[in-house]
Amino acid sequence: MKFGIFYELSVPRPFEENERKVYENALEQVKLADELGFDQVWAVEHHFLEEYSHCSAPELFLTACAMITKRIRVGHGIVTCVPQFNHPIRIAERAAVLDILSGGRLEMGTGRSATWTELGGFQADPDDTKKTWDEFVHAIPKMWTQERYRHEGQFFSMPSRAVLPKPIQKPHPPLWVAVSTPGTEDDAADRGMGCLGVNFTSFAEQERKVKEYRRRIQWCNPVGAFVNDQLNTVNFLYCHDDSDTGVSTGRRMIGKFQYMAGQLDMAKEVYPTRAYLSAGLLAGARRQAAAPGDLKEPPEGIAIGNPDQIIRELKKWEATGVDRCSFMLNAAEDIPHEQVMESLRLFATEVMPHFSDQSAADATRAAARAEAATGMAAGGGAA
Amino acid sequence: MPFFGTLDLAVGLAGAPVMTDLSPKTWELPGAEVLQVSYEVDEAASLAITPSSLHPSIPPYATFTVARYPESPHGPFHLASVRLIVRAGIRPRGLLIGAWCDNEAAAAALAAGWGYKVSPAEVSYVRNYQAIRGTVTIGGRTALDIALLDPEPVVGADLELFDNLHLTNVEGGAPVIVQVDPTYAHRSADRGRAELTTYEPETLGTTGIVPVYRVVAVACSADIELAAPRFVIDPTKPAISGTRRI
């Protein structure tokens, strides 16, 4: 299993004093993560989400990350595929530039926003976001791979133009979709896209989703020139030699994250629409915050505590067959920056070596392929 | 940390009822018709009417509701309300700013058992194919006129009708914010464009609610159960630590 780090870039008040520090700290952490062997750094796109996320221009942050690192891949994710937020041509252009400047290290995450705070702010219709996302993710890979591209669609049209520059990675960077609403993992599988699982659901539920994703992607109709069949789960990380310190500090960070998330207006809560069948990530975070548990132990599947505890929890994820795990390291700077750096170092030294192979993920892939082959041999193949 | 409200409690409690019965009998309200219009509201004004135990939502918004209850323990009645959506800790709640009722006995019981700050008024609810409209008339003058235009059916489960919070006095005790949790068994539901044709905050006593941006309108027909309140919040402490079961 590979490991990454994941940034919302949450900022405590007063913003004017703290925004710059949050960005500077994050860049130092990314530089260290690169040196320690972390595989990816992801940055979200969010707008107007006071305290919770001040990451409205992730492509700029990730460009800075790319400039100070050598090896770590840069996850542009998710980019909001809603026309009021981003024109698809601009998404393709910016991403290609980031791929060039990072030397071909771009991972391209896509999504559609789950808050009224953002959708209302851009005056986007929540009913349309699934459809706009779908239209965008079909078009963007073609903008990258075709010399010229033209499009007549429901949400955007363009005459034939050369969308420039083209990404370094050929045929194009891997494509992902953020999964916070139940059913989006099926959308990812159907389109041959990687599943960026930003849903903090139960471990058992995640296991079921991994299996279904692996099964379903066998019949995909890929939007890109290749299938990205990877699963990347999102987690929290705080690693400390002392279990009590690790768990209590980690729990405090998670609590703070969930508290900030709970202040936002979720699309489904404000605006009834079938396009948002659940309240998404943040409602899940609210439920988890209210859940009882043993305060001496990490919540199930969460990477907080001492190295042994974290290895134990991450082994459960590995066994489900996920390929990657990306960690949130802090919430509104609740953990002092130096402690975050120490946590990363300890994790890299004591935990990472226990996850050096991909056999569990490969096994779930092989099982799904075998099941698909059996089904097709029996005449049950895809239409 | 998110902002907390800055309401002066003495101001907030002016005109609030005195709850005399913290364990009222459950009301069965079959066949209720509810119209709710949502608007984003001015942040600063809404913060000033939010108790210091609660957070504003991001962004703050208000709901304007008119409901018809054809059956109740006190006979049929209409009830209108204006609520500010806030957070009790991390939970979305509708903080009651004002309510109006056309049935004196029902209004008195709602005040005594659930802490409704309710005033007498003529309240109407009219459903047509092209619109669902609700009004509040005080002293012969229409102070609130809301509508859902071009209704389209949705699934009742898609509607998020939050639990409510009422800042109130309690007989023989300190003021509390009482949580009121009606349950809905939906028969049908609609969604449509929100319209706030008339809104006179001075007449209604809701000057802290300043609509700035239309969100949506919803309506439903439902069997509603209004059970006794289960939780109260100390209005002087953050809800995360100041909430207790009755």
Image: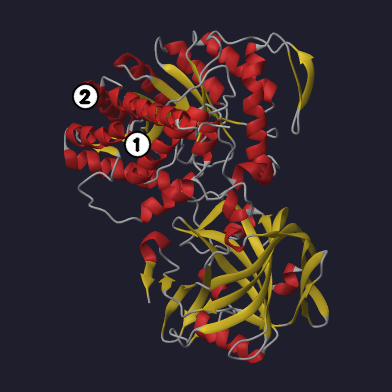
Q: Amino acid at mark 2?
A: His
**Can you give x and y, in whole percent of width and height, for residue A161 in the image?**
76, 13
Q: Please name the amino acid that badge 1 sits on.
A: Phe
Judge from the rendering whether residue B22 lies leftward or rightward of residue A345; answer left or right. right
Q: Secondary structure at mark 2?
A: helix
Neighbor class of circle 1 (other Cα within 10 Å; few <14, some 14-19, many 20+) is: many
Q: Give the labeled residue for mark 2.
A: A354
The chain letter for the residue carrying disc 2 is A
Disc 1 secondary structure class: strand
Residue A238 higher or lower than A102, as above or below: below
* Figure check: A155 above or below B119: above
Q: Position of residue A250 (x, y in %)?
A: 29, 40
Q: Cα distance, mark 1 to mark 2?
A: 18 Å
Residue at image coords 21%, 36%? A312
Image mark count: 2
The residue positioned 54% from the left and 28% from the top of the image is A220
Contact, mark 1 vs mark 2 (Cβ under 8 Å): no
Image quarter where the C terminus of chain B lies is bottom left
Q: Would residue A283 appear left or right of B34 to someone viewing this image?
A: left
Q: Which mark is residue B211?
A: none
Query: Chain under label 1?
Result: A
Can residue B131 be seen at all in this image of the molecule? yes
Residue B120: x and y in percent read 69, 84
Q: In this figure, which colouring scheme has been used for the structure?
A: secondary structure
Q: Where B220 falls versus A141 (above or below)? A: below
| Relative horizontal placement of residue A55, taking residue A243 as reference (left or right) | right
Residue A299 at what x, y percent from top left? 28, 46
**Callouts 1 and 2 on one subunit:** yes
Q: Which residue is mark 1?
A: A236
Foreground label between 1 and 2? 2
